[in-house]
Amino acid sequence: MPDPLPRSADVVIIGAGQAGLAVAYHLARRGLTVSEDVLVLDRGPGPGGAWQHRWSSLTLGGTHHLHDLPGMSEAGLSFSSAPTDVPARDVVANYYGTYEQRHGIAVLRPVTVTEVTRDGTGYRVMASAGSAVSEVRARVVVSATGTWTRPRIPYVPGRETFAGRQLTTAEFVSADAFAGMRVAVVGGGTSALTFLDEVGDVAAQVLWFTRRPPTFHDEEVELSPERGRVAVAIQDEAARAGRPLPSIVSVTGLPRSALVRRLEASGRLERLPMFAEMTPDGVVTREDVPIPLDAVIWATGFRPEIDHLRPLGVVNDAGGVAVEDGRVRGEDGLFLAGYGPQASTLSSNRAARVTARTISELLASDG
Ligand SMILES: Cc1cc2nc3c(=O)[nH]c(=O)nc-3n(C[C@H](O)[C@H](O)[C@H](O)COP(=O)(O)OP(=O)(O)OC[C@H]3O[C@@H](n4cnc5c(N)ncnc54)[C@H](O)[C@@H]3O)c2cc1C
């Protein structure tokens, strides 16, 4: 097969998850043509963003609520009426695929972007061998690459010596793999609670470790809009200052959801302080008490996937990027969608409209 040809466009969107698709939709509404003026690139094999890779027992409706993409109702779809008894990964892949077709958002797949460099007043987007396009030159780059392949694991002395199984949220496939095992779940967010619940049903023992004592909001069964707003504001402040983004749960705390109440009733919500070290046999507490384990699940969050932007010098030594209203500071044509304050399906939808408007104005001012 011949090598794919380089392409050029006004706008390149890297990533076809919620954030990238929403920007593509709003650019199309402003008169840009996807496939010509706007190229959407994605590494994944099919539609669905990171959702296509999530474990099969994860469903919508209980703990997980997705906001619809803009214009999704025109495709006759809404997550609010989506089935709650089939894997979310299938529902989201199916809905996003239908959405792409309905709105003519042709996504080039697979294209793995390796680096973005400067090219005159615009950018050059390079892709790995085997991608459907080798490089794209564009005036504007929107990086909407999410976090899924950048799980965060805290430093723990001796971690590499542990002889049991270690995996992150992104590697979790099914609780069945932990039948009869002694398992530690590390992390204070919803994924950790889900693993306590599902793994706890089949494991010989499941223990829960977190760095800080979790904060439960007894009066709430789901994240309140007010707490959501505060979380967005804190993320926004960090993004503007170019600081690494704080973890969401450290900001929001945990509502006393049905899942929390179920864990409490089953006695699995007994949180232990983070262990001090790992050994081949398990972990050792701060009081020097060894706890034998067969597996450790790191549900300790994610970092943004921004390595491809490093050649531009916009990622600082702490791993942060200074971003204001979705635009990288000092780079008029570089946008981060789904980053920081935009890292929920609700906030990324709202932000996509603003990003598309800013991009249209920039292209118009270029003439
Ligand atoms: C377990 C879990 C459950 C969640 N539940 C919810 C929930 O219930 N509600 C909610 O609002 N949010 C939830 N979130 C957060 C959720 O993931 C985001 O809100 C949203 O799905 C992220 O969309 P995104 O477009 O930013 O990223 P993603 O969905 O990750 O999409 C990024 C896309 O970029 C592509 N990509 C990445 N790097 C490259 C590259 N170098 N080159 C080319 N393409 C690339 C990927 O293939 C992917 O398709 C959850 C997160 C996790 C981890």
Image: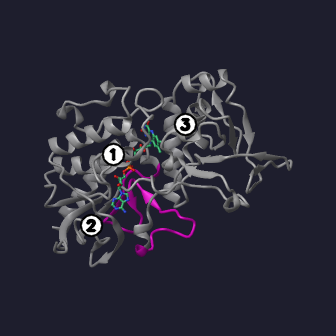
Label 3 beta carbon less than 8 Å to ligand 1: yes
Residue 131 location (% of width, % of height): 27, 66
| Residue 178, label in figure | none
Residue 195 location (% of width, % of height): 57, 37
The residue that disc 3 covers is 190
In the image, 345: left or right of 275?
Answer: left
CA gap, disc 2 to disc 1? 22 Å
Residue 98 location (% of width, % of height): 20, 40
Q: In which quarter of the view is residue 260 placed?
A: top right
Q: Secondary structure at mark 1?
A: helix
N-terminal-most mark, 2 or 3:
2
Q: Residues within 10 Å of mark 3 (few under 14, many from 20)?
A: some
The residue that disc 1 covers is 18
Residue farthest bottom in this picture? 120
Closest to the observer: 317 or 198? 198
Which residues, given as a range, are shown in magenta? 311-340
N-terminal-most mark, 3 or 1:
1
* Mark 2 touches mark 1? (CB < 8 Å): no
- Please check the rendered image and state whether residue 277 is part of the magenta-colored stretch, yes or no: no
Report the residue at 68% width, 59% height from top.
159
The residue that disc 2 covers is 131
